[in-house]
Every structure is written in structure tokens, then in C-alpha cells.
Image (cartoon, rainbow, N blue to C red):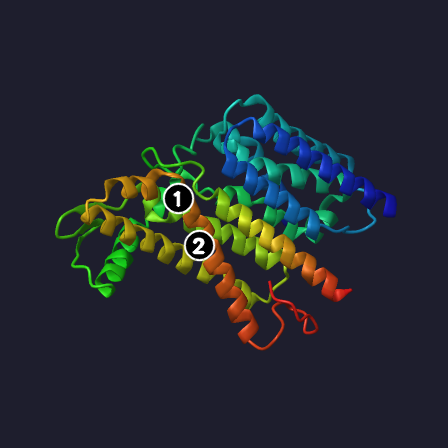
């Protein structure tokens, strides 16, 4: 049994490494990173499910899934939608090969983590279904009014005295929200938090993602209104714009840490742990 | 029986979807015109590193 687990672990690392090497060719950095986090998290929570040797048909199914996941990544030179399923297909295939249904059942958390590449970056269909542009414009207008800037909102358009700004595309904040949601799922599973805290992590991820992005939009609106075009371009499309996601992660992580610590108890399901996530 | 149906569905989904799916949904950083890509790499990397540290700290505390 011990050697079987060791072989499974080695195989999981090998499959993850091959998938990540193949994914690196696609040029989609966010997909690569989320796949790396998904495999890393899955490897941390994976465990043996029993001693039963899987049936031949189950092993064939596992082998086909595993091969299809590698094939999907190998044949495409560029990133494509099907890549998102490769980690899950690879993980499920490995589990079926190693221990059949018992191992699949024992590794639900690892399989959920391998679904993360489907969540982030949000697919086109999700972005169209969950258009957060209006909500972002609303919160941005609120921030502007609170800071004493005269603003009128017409749908997704923010009208200031000397300029106007339309909120759309990646400025809607959907990428930011889904990035924090992916981290929330990862945190909830690898840190084994209670369901209440998992709900807090997910809810706060949405709220912080929306609020931080709305702050960025409000800041951009002020720059546009002052005629600071160079600064506007820099914070809109230049490298500083990338720092917004780091700021959102820091705010969300810090807030979660504060809430969990002020809760008085342990941050995880364990009553003995004294550390916070 | 249910287990077989669930597994067969998952199997069919994982095999068929890549062939049927939209070939490129990544676009320019989430559909943004000329936006810097990748938009959320730094946050994702920082969050992943933070979680790895938290997990390590938790494991150490348990020992």
C-alpha cells in the first residue's frame, strides 16, 4: 500500500510537470499560474482511498482521461478553452488508475482544486453572463461622491464636470473578483477552514474584488477629469495597473486574517491550532 | 448505477468539451482593449505564496 501511494505521488508530480511544461508553450500566463496552484494544492490534500485494485475497465477509462489531458495540451500551440479541463481530466485519470472509485471519492477536495483553471480567468460566457460593469460604475460613483467629486452616473458611464468615463471589459472587475474567488477556494480547501469561514472567504473575495477595482476606476475618473492623460494611461494600461491585483489580494488577505483572529477561535476546523491563514 | 452514470457523464464531458469549445476565450486580458496582460498574475502569485506560507506555518504548529 505504501509503495502504491509513493508511485501515485510520483506519477502525480510527473503528470503535473508535463502538463505545466506543455501549458507554458501556450503563452497564457494566468492559465499556467492557476494550473500550477491547482496542482500544488491538489498534491497537498491528496490521500489514499483504499486498498482495492481497480477493475480493468476503470483503469482503461483513467488511462484515456490522462492521455486526453496531455494530448489536449500537446496538440495546441496556443491557449484554448479545452486547456482548462486538462488538470481535472489528468487528476481524475490518475485517481482511477491508482485506486478506482474509492480513490476518486476520497479525493473530492483535490478534484475541486483541479477545477480552478475553469474558474479563473473567467471564461467569455461567464463574463457575458455576470457583467459587473454597472455595479462597478455604481460603487465608483459612490466613492467619488464620498470624496467630494461631483459625478453623475448613466448606466456604466461616469460623467464628471470635465470628462466622462465608460466602465467596460476588464475594467468591470470580473477578472479581479474571480482571481480572489480562486484564491478563496484554494485557501478554504488547503487550510481546512470551517464552512462559515469558507463562506466568509468567498463573500469577501467578491466584495473586495469589486471595491478595489471600483476605487481604481474612481481614481482613473479623477485623473481624466484633471486632464492628467499620461498618468491616466499609465494606471489604465501601463505596468502600475498590474499592481491593483496585488493590492486587492493584500486587502483581502489582511481582512481575512483580521476577521479570523478577532473571531477568538482558531482559523481552521481544528480547535487546537493557533495560527491564522 | 448512479456512480457509473456520474463517471460516464464526467468522462464524456472531459473528452468532448475541448473539441466543441470556443478555441480562444482568453482574448486580451478579459476582453479589454490593449489592457496589460496578464491582469491578475501578481495578485495570484502573491496569494499563492501567502497560502503556501500559511499552510507551512499551520503544519509546523501542528508538529
Q: Is residue A162 left or right of residue A242?
A: left
Q: Is residue A45 above or below residue A71?
A: below
The Cα atoms of the two marked residues, 1 and 2, are separated by 13 Å
Across and down, in percent, residue A131 comes to 32, 47
Residue A10 shows in this picture? yes
Q: Residue A240: which disc?
A: 1
Q: Is residue A167 left or right of residue A153?
A: right
Q: Quadrant of residue A188?
A: bottom right
Q: Is residue A121 above or below residue A216?
A: above
Q: Residues within 10 Å of mark 2 (few under 14, many from 20)?
A: many
Mark sitting earlier along the chain (1/2): 1
Q: Residues within 10 Å of mark 1 (few under 14, many from 20)?
A: few
Q: Is residue B29 left or right of residue A196?
A: left
Q: Residue A171: which disc?
A: none
Across and down, in percent, residue A105 comes to 69, 51
Which residue is at a point 86% across and 48% down the rendered structure image?
A: A2
Across and down, in percent, residue A202 comes to 48, 59
Chain ID at mark 2: A
Name the one closer to the observer, A169 or A115. A169
Across and down, in percent, residue A81 comes to 48, 33
Which residue is at a point 36% across and 58% down the rendered structure image?
A: A211
Q: Quadrant of residue A90?
A: top right
Name the one closer to the observer, A178 or B42. B42
Q: Secondary structure at mark 2?
A: helix
Amino acid at each position: 500500500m505504501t509503495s502504491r501511494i509513493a508511485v501515485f505521488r510520483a506519477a502525480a508530480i510527473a503528470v503535473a510537470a508535463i502538463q505545466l511544461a506543455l501549458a507554458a508553450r501556450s503563452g497564457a500566463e494566468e492559465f499556467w499560474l492557476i494550473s500550477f496552484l491547482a496542482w500544488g494544492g491538489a498534491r497537498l490534500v491528496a490521500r489514499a482511498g483504499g486498498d482495492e485494485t481497480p477493475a480493468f475497465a476503470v483503469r482503461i477509462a483513467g488511462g484515456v482521461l490522462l492521455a486526453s489531458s496531455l494530448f489536449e495540451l500537446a496538440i495546441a500551440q496556443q491557449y484554448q478553452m479545452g486547456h482548462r479541463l486538462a488538470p481535472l481530466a489528468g487528476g481524475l485519470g490518475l485517481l482511477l488508475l491508482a485506486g478506482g472509485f474509492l480513490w476518486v471519492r476520497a479525493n473530492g477536495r483535490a478534484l475541486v482544486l483541479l477545477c480552478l483553471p475553469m474558474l479563473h480567468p473567467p471564461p467569455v460566457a461567464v463574463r457575458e453572463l455576470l457583467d459587473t460593469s454597472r455595479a462597478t460604475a455604481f460603487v465608483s460613483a459612490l466613492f467619488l461622491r464620498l470624496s467630494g467629486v461631483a459625478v453623475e452616473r448613466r448606466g456604466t458611464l461616469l460623467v464628471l464636470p470635465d470628462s466622462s468615463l465608460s466602465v467596460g471589459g476588464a475594467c468591470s472587475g470580473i477578472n479581479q473578483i474571480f482571481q480572489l474567488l480562486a484564491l478563496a477556494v484554494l485557501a478554504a480547501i488547503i487550510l481546512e477552514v470551517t464552512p462559515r469561514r469558507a463562506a466568509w472567504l468567498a463573500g469577501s473575495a467578491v466584495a473586495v474584488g469589486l471595491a478595489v477595482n471600483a476605487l481604481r476606476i474612481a481614481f482613473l475618473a479623477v485623473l481624466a477629469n484633471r486632464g492628467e492623460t499620461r498618468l491616466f494611461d499609465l494606471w489604465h494600461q501601463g505596468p502600475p495597473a498590474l499592481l491593483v491585483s496585488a493590492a486587492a489580494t493584500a486587502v483581502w488577505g489582511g481582512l481575512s486574517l483580521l476577521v479570523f483572529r478577532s473571531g477568538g477561535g482558531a482559523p481552521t476546523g481544528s480547535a487546537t491550532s493557533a495560527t491564522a491563514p | 448505477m448512479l456512480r457509473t452514470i456520474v463517471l460516464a457523464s464526467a468522462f464524456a464531458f472531459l473528452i468532448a468539451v475541448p473539441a466543441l469549445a470556443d478555441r480562444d476565450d482568453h482574448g486580451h486580458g478579459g476582453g479589454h482593449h490593449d489592457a496589460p496582460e496578464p491582469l491578475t498574475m501578481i495578485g495570484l502569485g502573491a496569494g499563492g505564496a501567502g497560502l503556501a506560507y500559511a499552510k507551512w506555518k499551520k503544519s509546523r504548529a501542528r508538529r
